[in-house]
Image (cartoon, rainbow, N blue to C red):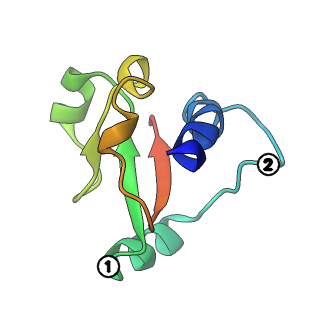
Amino acid sequence: MILRSALLPFLLLAACGSELDAVPRVTVQQLHDAMNQQQALAIDVRTLDAFKLGHIKGAAHIPLSEIAARASELPTGRKLVTYCS
């Protein structure tokens, strides 16, 4: 659980679009390949309305305002890739 808690600031910053060297970026193709190999999970941090309008197939929906409270839902052993647009 410590690792998961330690990752939350990076998840939140990545989701907010902050430019940090510590937050790796992935291409659409890299994410697609990693998701197909069960090595990554895309997490849509937008509102539910935005998620319903369209999202990455297989993405989890956890609004940015809830991500810290719902950290226990995040899988271990997979890369977590947040996106908001």
Label 1 sits on residue: 36
Vertically, is 70 above or below 23? above
Secondary structure state at the residue bearing disc 1: helix
The extreme right residue here reads: 21
Residue under the image location 37 percent in, 23 percent down: 69
- The 10 Å Cα crowd at callout 2, few under 14, some 14 to 19, many 20 or more, is few
Among the 4 quarters of the image, the one containing residue 33? bottom left
The extreme top residue here reads: 65
C-alpha span from label 2 to label 1: 25 Å
Quarter holding the C terminus is top left
Label 2 sits on residue: 22
Q: Position of residue 64 (x, y in %)?
A: 43, 24
Q: Position of residue 34 (x, y in %)?
A: 44, 75
Residue under the image location 56 percent in, 37 percent down: 5
Secondary structure state at the residue bearing disc 2: loop
Residue under the image location 36 percent in, 21 percent down: 66
What label sits on residue 65 in the rendered view? none
Relative to 29, is 8 on the left or the right?
Answer: right
- The 10 Å Cα crowd at callout 1, few under 14, some 14 to 19, many 20 or more, is few
The extreme front residue here reads: 1
Mark 2 vs mark 1: in front: 2
Q: Amino acid at mark 2?
A: Ala
Q: Pointer 2 and pointer 1: residues touching (CB < 8 Å)? A: no
Q: Position of residue 54 (x, y in %)?
A: 22, 41
Vertically, is 62 above or below 32? above
Q: Amino acid at mark 1?
A: Asn
Camera-side residue: 50 or 80?
A: 80
Query: Sequence-wise, which precedes: disc 2 or disc 1?
Result: 2
Vertically, is 32 above or below 66? below
